Image: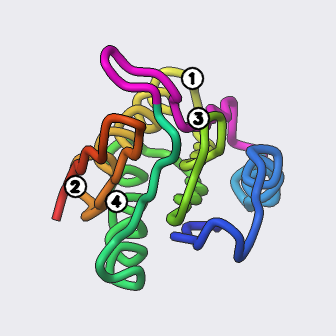
Amino acid sequence: MIVKIIEKDDEFYKIADLVDSLKKSSRIDESGAIFTFEGIVRGKEKDLDLDKLILTTPDKEKTEKELKLISESVKSKFGIYEIAIVHYIGEFYTGDTLFLVAVLGPHRKETLDALKDVIERTKFDLEFKKEEISKTGTKIIMAGG
């Protein structure tokens, strides 16, 4: 399965690529659901018009390993068959894709719950630094780690 942290311009994946990888699973005949998520850059917030966003992690290999551990943990917790994840790092603009997740499972409820868990754990458990750059300055958000 695909579980990667990727520099924005090094490789390119779409949700369809992740779904295609899940459909090659040996468990596809037992599956009844695939749920997906695509996280994109939001250009406007309450008091911010974003010019660009820079997302980094201090140790890409460590973060990717932790992402794989999240995937395995979620599979076990929810009885899910496969999870594919791509999280990009680098420089982004409004509408750019940051985060892709696809989950293959036996039924819709646990598959959707697993998707939500992957999203939340990735956001809060992994060490990322997000710099939101606007005309009014730079806002730095640290997550996880």
Q: State the image quarter where residue 40 is shown.
A: top right
Task: Check if mark 4's residue and mark 2's residue have beta carbons within 8 Å.
Answer: yes
Front residue of 92/19: it is 92
The amino acid on which the numbered mark 2 sits, given as a three-letter code, is Asp
| Sequence-wise first label, 4 or 3 | 3
Marks 1, 4: nearer the viewer: 4
User: What is the number of the mark on residue 70?
Assistant: 4
The residue sitting at 33% across, 53% down in the picture is 130
Could you tell me how far apart the alpha carbons at marks 4 and 2 are, in whole angstroms?
A: 9 Å
* Amino acid of disc 1: Arg
Magenta segment, which residues? 29-49
Where's residue 72, x and y in %? 39, 62
To which residue does mark 1 refer? 108
Label 2 crowd (10 A; few <14 / some 14-19 / many >=20): some
| SS assignment at label 3 | strand
Closer-to-camera residue (126/8): 8
**Amino acid tagged 3:** Phe
Measured Cα–Cα span from mark 1 to mark 4? 20 Å
Q: Which of marks 4 and 2 is nearer the N terminus?
A: 4
From this viewpoint, which residue is outermost toward the left?
145
**Mark with earlier residue (1, 4):** 4
What crowding class fits label 4: few (fewer than 14 Cα within 10 Å), some (14-19), or many (20 or more)?
Answer: many
**Which residue has dot 3 on it?**
37
Quarter of the picture holding the C terminus: bottom left
Q: Which of marks 3 and 1 is in front?
A: 3
Q: Mark 3 Cα within 10 Å, few/some/many (few <14, many 20+)?
A: some
**Residue 10 in the image, given as x and y percentages of width and height:** 70, 76
Mark 1 or mark 3, which is nearer the start of the sequence?
A: 3
What element does badge 4 sit on? helix
